[in-house]
Image (spheres, helix red, strand yellow):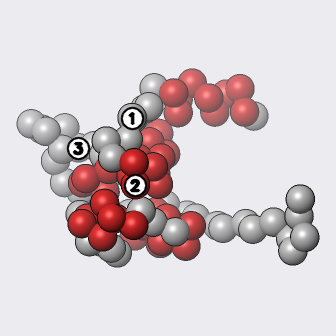
Amino acid sequence: TPRTAYFPLAEQFITQGEPAFCGPSCLAMVLNTLRIDPNTTWKGGWRWFDEHTLASSCCKPLEAIHQEGITLDEFAALGRCHGAAVNVFRPEEGFP
């Protein structure tokens, strides 16, 4: 339920460091909430996703994300690249 999903997600809240990092920041929050191992250290011994460790590992170069952001399809690909099961749902044509 939304109520039970809120608190684990809120514990992982990340503020995006750059305007174009909204997608990677959101995805890092979700991957950390799902306890998916990033297979790299963040700071010290902590294994944690943030927008930089997430984006630097696959898919699109960090500098390109900094300039352009990411699309929904790139967001999904980045999540899959890190082991998340991602399904993209788009509204039907003509959805208000």
| Sequence-wise first label, 3 or 1 | 1
State how far apart marks 1 and 2 are (Cα). Answer: 12 Å
Answer left or right for 96 relative to 46: right
Q: Residue at x 18, y 44 (%)?
A: 42
The x and y percentages for residue 71 are: 52, 69
State how far apart marks 3 and 1 are (Cα). Answer: 18 Å
Callout 1: helix, strand or loop? loop
Relative vertical location of residue 16 with respect to residue 53 in this rendering, above or below: above
The x and y percentages for residue 59 are: 34, 75
Tell me, for residue 89, which label it has, or none.
Answer: none
Identify the residue under disc 2.
Answer: 20
Identify the residue under disc 1.
Answer: 15
Report if the CB atoms under discs 2 and 3 are less than 8 Å apart: no
Answer left or right for 33 relative to 5: left
Give the residue type that dot 1 points to: Thr
Residue nearest the viewer, comparing 23 with 37: 23
Give the residue type that dot 2 points to: Ala
Mark in the foreground, 2 or 3: 2
Relative vertical location of residue 69 with respect to residue 73 in this rendering, above or below: above
Tell me, for residue 47, which label it has, or none.
Answer: 3
Residue 35 appears in the picture as rendered: no
Q: Residue at x 33, y 47 (%)?
A: 18
Mark in the foreground, 3 or 1: 1
| Sequence-wise first label, 1 or 2 | 1
The x and y percentages for residue 22 are: 45, 49
Q: Residue at x 43, y 32 (%)?
A: 12
Mark in the foreground, 1 or 2: 2
Relative vertical location of residue 87 with respect to residue 20 in this rendering, above or below: below
State how far apart marks 2 and 3 are (Cα). Answer: 24 Å
The N terminus - image quarter: top right
